[in-house]
Amino acid sequence: MSTETHRELTEEGVEARVGELLGQERFAPPAAFAEGAEITDPELRAKAAEDPVAYWEEQAGKLRWSTPWETALNETDAPFYRWFEGGRVNVSDNCLDRHVEAGNGDRVAYHWHGEEGETRDVTYAQLLEQTARFAGALRELGVQEGDVVGIYLPMIPEVAVAMLACTRIGAVHNVVFGGFSATSVAERMEVSGAKVLVTADGGRRKGKTAPVKPEVDKHFADLDGLQKIVVVKNAGNDVAMQDGRDVWFHEVLDAADPVDPVPLDAEAPMFILYSSGSTAKPKGIQHTTGGYLTGATTSLRQVFDLKPESDVYWCSADVGWITGHSYIVYGPLANGITSVMYEGAPDYPHKGIWWELIEQRKVTKFYTAPTAIRAAMKWGVGHVSGRDLSSLKLLGSVGEPINPKAWLWYWHVVGGERCPVVDTWWQTETGSIVITTLPGVDDAKPGSAGTPLPGYEVKVLDADKGTEVASGEGLLAIPRPWPSMLRTLYQDPDRYRSTYFDRWEKGAAGGEQIPYFVGDSARIDDDGYIWVIGRVDDVINVSGHRLSTAEVESAIVAHPHVAEAAVVAKADDLTGQAIVAYVTLQGDTESTDEVKAEIDAEIADRIGKLARPKRIVWTQDLPKTRSGKIMRRLLRDIAEERDLGDVTTLADPTVVESLQDRWREGA
Ligand code: WTA
């Protein structure tokens, strides 16, 4: 029986409704939502724009500082900006102590749900207790302010404890996504000079146990700098513990004395997060304490219209990505709200698990990625139909452009046409959401992220001239610094400058500084709404995960029989983009399924399974210019089955014809 709350949905009904809505350009905030919204002032952006620095000071002032700042923004060493200089603040204090002192210690911070149906509620008081103790344990293991601590953990509450404990004593965390391989963890630990790694015995994934610690052991024997490995007992699999190096998380936690939060310089490094760039070497994106916390806290409060007393918020990302940092750990905790944390995959134990959890926990705000929405569409509305999703008040999307069809499905099927859908554009580098719609104020346009949040200026610039495009296509740029921006690339300030501040002249687009080069192309419409098109560098976005073509190529050529490889992105209905690899084998090596499996294994080992190509095309040769440069543009055109246009600059134009044939043959 269909009721208002348990809506019965059919595929035909949904298709018809989505089809009908496809013609609608704008979606105003639903009246019931707008009435209760926190931000209702349509002038907020304009007011913030009058004096953005003062606006950010006002936002930062909502946090608890042990010493107020002297200089809100120091631009003397641009583009190495400094925010809230002279101020002292502690992140874990703001995320935990502050709420417990205010009498909210019994509030649940995380309703954790395990894959096999287990649940664990962790209150703010408990999280504080564990964090303070683990901070003490880290100290006893020799971690000092400024030291790097690696974290390689599944989605369990201990990951938040480990991160918060670092911030409590000023250690710099370096979290590596659980889907990356132990080899890439080792590499990231080495380049960041990590002293301690916090990991788990094993991870659980769709009913199986992934042997995390045993894999880690294979790669960590000769890492000089790494002194200790702390192991969380999670999956219960057998692990060897190396004497003098490996310790159990629960044992060091029990033995340690809790420590108080250390007041840290606002510009003290808070964490590094490696992200793919246009070379094979990942970039260590570095964030600092006061500005990052200000950005993450403010944006979540505004964009998700937070009501700490009543919200149950759920962000389905993994903590190993920036979305997990800002919107599973720091933003939610600093705002003192209750979150759901889910360990598992969206299709385990069944394809309706997310909707079941939303129903069970009465989730009010839900934040996920377009790729997950498209997967749910593919699995069918049968998995959603009949669920009571009436607790939902707002839906968010992040990670890649959301196509209007997926947006409308989300709006109609999940949100019941009552919940604003906010498409949030941002990056690891920006630290927090930059472009979106304020849910109680702005109309949404499906397919467009919206306009910059208050305090931000974002422009679309002509790629070459750097002049502003008022309406049309160009490159995204952020002309003015903002508090949660990256401060540098870890131990590589030159690369920071050349990657982000080398594209345009100082003062381009009317600002006073060199505009920050985002790396995305976008279109801006007559209403100032921004439609992000995609990356303009060699970064591929698979299911919202950032990967670099160069990284995948170097993993492929590591196979002993591969002579050469070129990797490009191809549009994909489900994952947004998919990886296509063109591979030339050495001499008379045959292109067998076995070689393909070995290449896949090489990539899984060096990067992680997520970077395996969707398709490998074997080729005798790659299209190259006379100077030997691989023309990736042509490889993209072949994969997209487009006309190739001018191929006269190629050293051997016949190469592309045979590649087109091979592509069509499915070879
Ligand atoms: C893309 C993820 C369109 C974009 C938070 C950006 C998006 C890159 C959106 C950053 C969106 C992220 N619409 N594109 N709403 N959100 N992107 O560092 O290309 O993993 O540059 O940060 O993802 O990916 P990152």
Image (tube, rainbow, N blue to C red):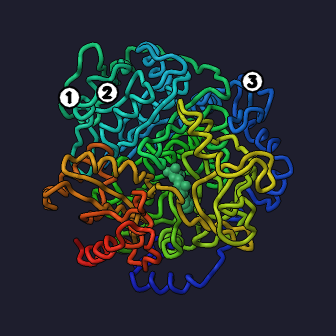
Q: In this view of the protein, which residue sits in the foreground, 360 or 524?
A: 524
Give the spatial CA distance, label 2 vs label 3. Answer: 37 Å
Q: Which mark is residue 73?
A: none
The residue under label 1 is 239
The amino acid at mark 1 is: Val
At 24% from the left and 42% from the top, the residue drawn is 210
**Secondary structure beneath disc 1?**
loop
- Cβ of disc 1 within 8 Å of ligand 1? no
Q: Is residue 329 left or right of residue 184?
A: right
- Identify the residue position indicated by label 2 in the image: 231
Position of the N terminus by quadrant = bottom left
Label 2 vs 3, first from the N-terminus: 3
Disc 3 residue type? Gly
Q: Which mark sits nearer the N-terminus, 1 or 3?
A: 3
- Determine crowd level at label 2: few under 14, some 14-19, many 20+ residues with C-alpha closer than 10 A: many
Tell me whether circle 2 and circle 1 mark residues in contact (CB < 8 Å): yes
From the top left corner, tell me how far across and down residue 88 is, in percent: 69, 24
Taking depth in this image into account, of 75 and 95 the one nearest to the observer is 75
Secondary structure beneath label 3: loop
Front disc: 2 or 3:
3
At 42% from the left and 30% from the top, the residue drawn is 191
